[in-house]
Amino acid sequence: MIYKIFQDDPLGSYSVDDIIEIAGKDYYEMSQRTIFRAIEKLDNLRKIYCAGTMKGHRKFQLSNTGCLDLICNHCGTKVTMKTMLKSQLAAEIYEGYKFNILGFTAEYYGTCSCTNHKERNRCSD
């Protein structure tokens, strides 16, 4: 049942308190201890991982999910995008390096559509 909460929103990240709240609405009341045990088991099975902490609470996500930061070289705008790692890429990494990816973050640099740099983008050289 806890795993279904993650599957229903594969890009979501949840604390134990979040799961208690969702489970109470959609399923039935669960004790904090039951949720901790379920999270520990899912973590040991590498179905989920701890993506970090927020306000003193650990946040968990499905494995093979993470964030991409899109950063504009001109105006400095940074957009964070949650996404899932494509299974083909994860398989290639595992086959080539025997490395099992649980989560990820990556930064991509480029230019956005802001008006601050449209003049500088023209090829005038």
Image (tube, grey):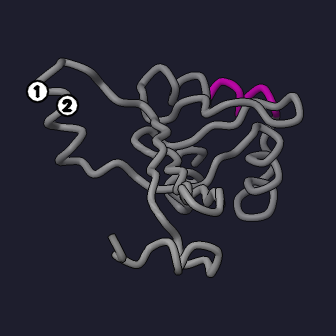
Q: Badge 2: few (under 14), some or many (20 or more) residues near its Cα, within 10 Å?
A: some
At which x and y percent is residue 49? 53, 30
Q: Quadrant of residue 39?
A: top right
- Classify residue 79 as left or right of residue 47: right
Q: Residue at x 53, y 45 (%)?
A: 3
The residues bearing labels 1 and 2 have C-alpha atoms spaced at a distance of 6 Å
Amino acid type at mark 2 = Ile
Q: Residue at x 42, y 31 (%)?
A: 102
Residue 117 part of the magenta-drawn span: no
Q: Residue at x 70, y 59 (%)?
A: 27
Q: Are marks 1 and 2 in contact (CB under 8 Å)?
A: yes
Numbered disc 1: secondary structure: helix
Quarter of the picture containing the C terminus is: bottom left
Numbered badge on residue 70: none
Residue 36's place in the image compared with 116, above or below, is above
Give 119 or 8, whichever is nearer the viewer.
119
Numbered disc 2: secondary structure: helix
The stretch in magenta equals 32-38
Q: Badge 1: few (under 14), some or many (20 or more) residues near its Cα, within 10 Å?
A: few
The residue pinned by badge 1 equals: 95
Q: Residue at x 74, y 47 (%)?
A: 19
The residue pinned by badge 2 equals: 93
What secondary structure do most residues of the magenta stretch adopt?
helix
